[in-house]
Each structure stands twice: as C-alpha cells, then as structure tokens.
Amino acid sequence: MTIYPVILTGGAGSRLWPLSREHYPKPLLPLFGDRTLLQDTALRLANLPGAKAPIFVCNEEHRFLVAEQVQALGHKAGAILLEPEGRNTAPALTVAALYLLEKDPDAIMVVMPADHVIPDSAVFQAAVERGVALADKGQLVTFGVVPQHAETGYGYIRRGDAIEKDVSYRVSKFVEKPDLATAQGYVDSGEYYWNSGIFTMRADAWVAEMQRLAPAILEACKHAVASGKRDDDFCRVEKSAFLSSPSDSIDYAVMEKTDKAAVVPLDAGWSDVGAWSALWDISARDTSGNVLQGDVLTHDVNDTLVLAHHRCVAAIGLEGAVIIETPDAVLVTHRNRSQDVKEIVSQLKKSGRDEYKFHRRVYRPWGDYEGIDNGARYQVKRLTVKPGASLSLQMHHHRAEHWIVVKGTAKVTRGEDVFILSENESTYIPLGTKHRLENPGAIPLEIIEVQSGSYLGEDDIVRFQDVYDRC
C-alpha cells in the first residue's frame, strides 16, 4: 500500500488580508513560528508508513515559491502540478489522480489543503491510518472534525451508520454553513462534525466516481494532463483543456452524491485559520488575552490581536480588536467582524488597486523587488537577485532604467555589450534596449533601480529569453 500526500495550495486567503495576498497567499506565510503553513503541511505525513514525497497542486504563479519552501525543509516534492488558473478543488484533485495513476495504479491519495493548522500530529496520523484502511477498500473518506463549539463559518457532516464504532461511519449528509442556533443543535446532537476538507481515497476510485458523477470535469482534466508539459519536478497542464473544465469543489462534484462516502472523526486541534479571529483563537495569549507580534505597545488592551511587520504599533483602550500592520496597508477591525475582510479585498479589486494582489515586496523566481518611492513619471525599486540567478533578456517600450549596485556583483547585458558592475557602480538602460541583469557571485546582489518614462507598469516587459519559461 503506497500513500501519496496531495497538497492543494490554491486560494488567496482573502480574509487574512493584508498579510495574505493573491501573489503571496496564506499557505506561504509563517503564521506560527519559523515554518510556513505549507511547510508544516508537507511535514505532517512525513513519518506515516508507506508515504511517498508529496504531490503539490498550485497556481503557475506560485511554482517557484512552493519549490523553494519544500527545498528549505531538505525535502523533495514528488511533483508540482501547475494550474494556469484555479478551477476549484475537484479539477485539482482529478489532475493529481490522473498523474499518479500513470506511475502507480494502486496509489492511495491523502488530500489536504496547504493552509490548515493541526497541532496534534500523532492523533492526525492515527486518524489518517484508519482512513487509508477504508480507502483501500474503495471508500471515499473524509475527516470530520469533532466540534468544540457552535461555529457558523464551517460546513458540517452528519454521520450515518457505524462502519466501525467510534472509528468510522457512513456519511448521512453534508450540510452548508448553518446559522448559530442550527449549529448549536448540531453540536448538541453529537451526530455532526465540522467539514475539514481533508480526504483519502484510491486514485482509481476517485476517477471512477468522477466518470460517473462529473464526466465533463474528468474529460477536460484527461486532455489537460495528456497534453501537458513536464519539466523536472513541474508538470504544467495544457491551459485551454484545463480551463474548459467546469469549476466545482470535491464536495459538490462527488462527495455529496456518491454512495461510497465515509467519515473518520478527527480530534487533533484542527483549524483552517480562515480569518483573523481564528488565528487569535489558536494562538498563545498573554495575561490580558492579547496576541502581540512585532513592535507593539499597548495600554488597557484586552483580547486583541496585533501583528506589526514594519512599524511600531501602539494601541490604547481596546477590547476584541484586530490590528494588522504591513508596509503598505493596515487593517483595523473587531474580531467578530473579521470574516468581512473579504469585502475590503473586493473593494480593492473593483477600484483597480494592486494591494489585493501584491505586497510591497514582490517575489520572483530570481529573487524579489520592493517599491521604495514613486511619482508621476518615475519609480524607485530595490532589487535582490539570488546567487547564480538572472532576470530575463527583455526590453521596455515606455521606460528607461538606471541601475546602481549597492551590494554584490552584477553582470549586465545592454544591447550588444556585456560587462561587470561592482558596488557603487551604475549603468543606464535606454528605452527600447534589450537588457539582462545576472548575479554571477556567491552572495545576493542588491541594486537600486530608478525607472523613468510615460508608463511604468509591470506589464511593459517584452521577454526574449527566460530561464524560468515565463512568457
């Protein structure tokens, strides 16, 4: 019996804005300690008998970030499957199942979102082992979290007849997020679990149920995988075929319709960290009930979450508040309104602002850049290029650039010229000139880039060569 963890890293985590954003979302963040949620998820099944290296399904934009975070653990991904655009969890899981069946017709998948917190790994692994035993017999198994209180932010699973008493049950039904009174009734009955979004099943059993219950998704995914491009650990599904798939969740597409659904209870401290209130709930608090991170000063503050990432934050006379400070945005809300953060994200999108998508520091395969200043016809950035990395050979139609090396050594291609710049040296890239920046050294290269021109958007890039296969 061979187990393949399948880790789904889609989703923007918009209710954790401004820390979580589309181009650097919640799974990639270290909300607890030094490891990110994705790294903790990757380690969660590392010691499970028979478990292979995890398979990741992620957005094309995040592929190098995911790969780097796995490498930082000293581990290797089994594969990183790339979606050109999210189509919800059912197509993502189907792509993973089809990929695994090519290499192992008996593959058993343990499917997890990359952004959950499960403190008790031993209890979790024991539950997974019980679920895997059922999955090996053809069941599609979900894990139902034993509820600690009435919660309106989760869906619920009602258990049916026992398969093995106190260990596993048939699924009676799935229930949408209830109102508070209904949720309390569910908890009081002892028959309902929170829907964790974690599953285990044989890959062939999942594909068989997709054929029966969601054939349009399966057909699109088959074409997308068969026509996909494979490059080292990356498997890029074919774009047009994948986007022709209907968008649907694992629950809606299959689990609510199948007669093979089983549920295994899970009581391991699970949280999906779906909002700032959830982070406060599961974090260690001081004697005033506060969770404080960063440079924070308080006076007469209770039961409050304050995260300061860039500046000193001072709070006075607050109770039950949430304050999240980042270099370019600050969120202030009451804890019981933290689910509404997504409304602010919607406003940012509608107004065409980039703060819903990018942080001030933007990560790229070669390193990162950070905005320092901007005006009507100029902007200033700090670029950090990793040792051995290079930007694409490119040109711009609307802007010229000045580069000043402040740390390390730069190899510069400017038109037909190739030359080296050391610290405190600079060069000018005229508008319309092909150019490339490389770091040939052993330490990070840092440069200050001053852009000037009539249009300074990131889409004013024409790439001629790119080692990261970007368009």
Image (spheres, rainbow, N blue to C red):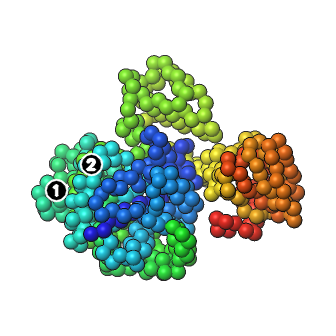
Rendered residue at 46%/24% (across/down):
318
Q: Is residue 295 left or right of residue 40?
A: right
Three-letter residue code for mark 2: Ala
Q: Is residue 436 above or below residue 137?
A: above
Rendered residue at 53%/77% (across/down):
228
The mark found on residue 338 in the picture is: none
Q: Is residue 375 above or below residue 136?
A: above
Rendered residue at 23%/54% (across/down):
126
SS type, badge 2: helix
**Quadrant of residue 140 in the image?**
bottom left
Quadrant of the drawing holding the C terminus = bottom right
Can residue 213 be seen here? The reply is no
Q: What x and y, as percent, mark residue 470? A: 65, 66
How far apart marks 1 and 2 lie (CA) works out to 16 Å
Considering only order in the chain, which callout, 2 or 1, is on the residue closer to the N terminus?
2
Which one is in front in this view, the residue at disc 1 or the one at disc 2?
Answer: 2
Quadrant of the drawing holding the N terminus = bottom left
SS type, badge 1: loop
Rendered residue at 18%/59% (across/down):
168
Q: Is residue 110 left or right of residue 403?
A: left
Q: Which residue is mark 1?
A: 167
Q: Which residue is mark 2?
A: 122
Can residue 234 be seen here? The reply is yes
Q: Is residue 357 above or below residue 307?
A: below
Q: What x and y, as percent, mark residue 454? A: 84, 54
In front of the other: 147 or 31:
31
In front of the other: 337 or 120:
120
Three-letter residue code for mark 1: Val
Residue furthest to the front in view is 442
**Quadrant of residue 6 in the image?**
bottom left
Q: What x and y, as percent, mark residue 74? A: 47, 53
Crowd class of label 2 (few under 14; some 14 to 19; many from 20; radius 10 Å):
some
